[in-house]
Image (spheres, rainbow, N blue to C red):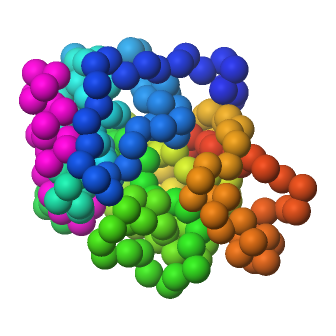
């Protein structure tokens, strides 16, 4: 187990541009990138970044030598990630699609993802607008559960997934789903961060649902790591 104090920090190289409504790389993106050590990402590693947003994590993996494919359902995110890859002169293939539907039959050595994971007062994810980058249903798990379902088929034997999520979205369920799918899953990194603007804006609702205690002003982020046997 690695805590935030032990994990290496990641500073993005160059400026990360994004169109309006595209998620800005924040603490969770940097936290995910910090888990991608050079002993894991080697030259030639085939890596898939799902829900790439601006492409910050994908660019970090490419700088470590990986052959990177990045996917997002948002047209603006895809345009932003392609622009950032071009500006950085990094060969990142950015595709638009709904998770693995963009890559039928493809498999990878490593899958990384910073999916929407904030609980929201809706039974479905938004189809447009900035909230699409973070709202993930009543329990925050709509995208997480779909990635857990897709991961075994997207990975080669011995392949690994690294996914960041909030403690508000029940990491125990993520571990259970991945283990039930035949993967060996654990929490590899933890860190605590203050609530951001989105969570602060719906604290009353989160507390009414029992997801946030009344005296809490921070949340735990975790890196879920799983290996396909």
Q: In the rendered structure, which segment of residues is drawn in magenta?
A: 79-99
Q: Quadrant of residue 37?
A: top left
Q: How many marks?
A: 0
Q: Position of residue 106 (x, y in %)?
A: 16, 51
Against 52, is 169 above or below? below
What residue is at 41 percent from the left and 15 percent from the top? Answer: 39
Camera-side residue of 114 and 226: 114
Front in this rendered view, residue 137 or 64 = 137
Q: Position of residue 90 (x, y in %)?
A: 13, 24
Residue beneath the point at 66% across and 26% down: 4
Q: Position of residue 148 (x, y in %)?
A: 44, 60
Q: Nearer the viewer, residue 136 or 75?
A: 75
Q: Is residue 64 left or right of residue 8?
A: left
Which residue is depicted at the point 41% across and 38% down?
A: 25
Quadrant of the image containing the C terminus: top left
Given the current orientation, which residue lies at the most extreme bottom position? 123
Quadrant where the N terminus sits is top right
Residue 15: which quarter of the image? top left
**Residue 24 visible in the displayed image:** yes
Q: Position of residue 205 (x, y in %)?
A: 71, 75
Placement of 118 over or under 48, stated as above or below: below
Task: Check the image and report above or below for 15 versus 39.
Answer: below
Identify the residue at image location x=59%, y=53%: 197
Horizontal side, residue 146 vs residue 19: left or right: right
Check if residue 92 falls in the magenta segment.
yes
Q: Is residue 229 visible?
A: no
Is 80 contained in the magenta span?
Answer: yes
């Amino acid at each position: 187990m690695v805590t935030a104090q032990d994990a290496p920090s990641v500073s993005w190289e160059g400026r990360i541009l994004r169109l309006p409504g595209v998620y800005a790389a924040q603490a969770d993106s940097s936290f995910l990138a910090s888990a991608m050590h050079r002993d894991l990402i080697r030259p030639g590693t085939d890596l898939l970044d799902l829900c790439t947003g601006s492409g910050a994590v994908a660019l970090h993996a490419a700088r470590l030598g990986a052959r990177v494919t990045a996917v997002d359902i948002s047209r603006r995110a895809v345009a932003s990630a392609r622009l950032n890859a071009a500006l950085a002169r990094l060969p990142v293939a950015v595709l638009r699609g709904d998770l693995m539907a963009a890559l039928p039959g493809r498999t990878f050595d490593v899958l990384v993802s910073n999916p929407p994971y904030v609980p929201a007062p809706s039974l479905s994810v938004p189809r447009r607008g900035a909230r699409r980058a973070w709202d993930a249903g009543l329990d925050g798990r709509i995208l997480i559960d779909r990635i857990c379902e897709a991961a075994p088929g997207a990975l080669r034997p011995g392949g690994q997934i690294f996914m960041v999520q909030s403690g508000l979205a029940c990491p125990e369920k993520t571990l259970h789903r991945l283990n039930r799918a035949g993967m060996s899953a654990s929490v590899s990194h933890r860190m605590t961060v203050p609530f951001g603007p989105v969570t602060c804006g719906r604290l009353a609702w989160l507390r009414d649902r029992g997801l946030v205690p009344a005296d809490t002003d921070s949340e735990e982020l975790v890196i879920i790591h799983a290996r396909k046997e």
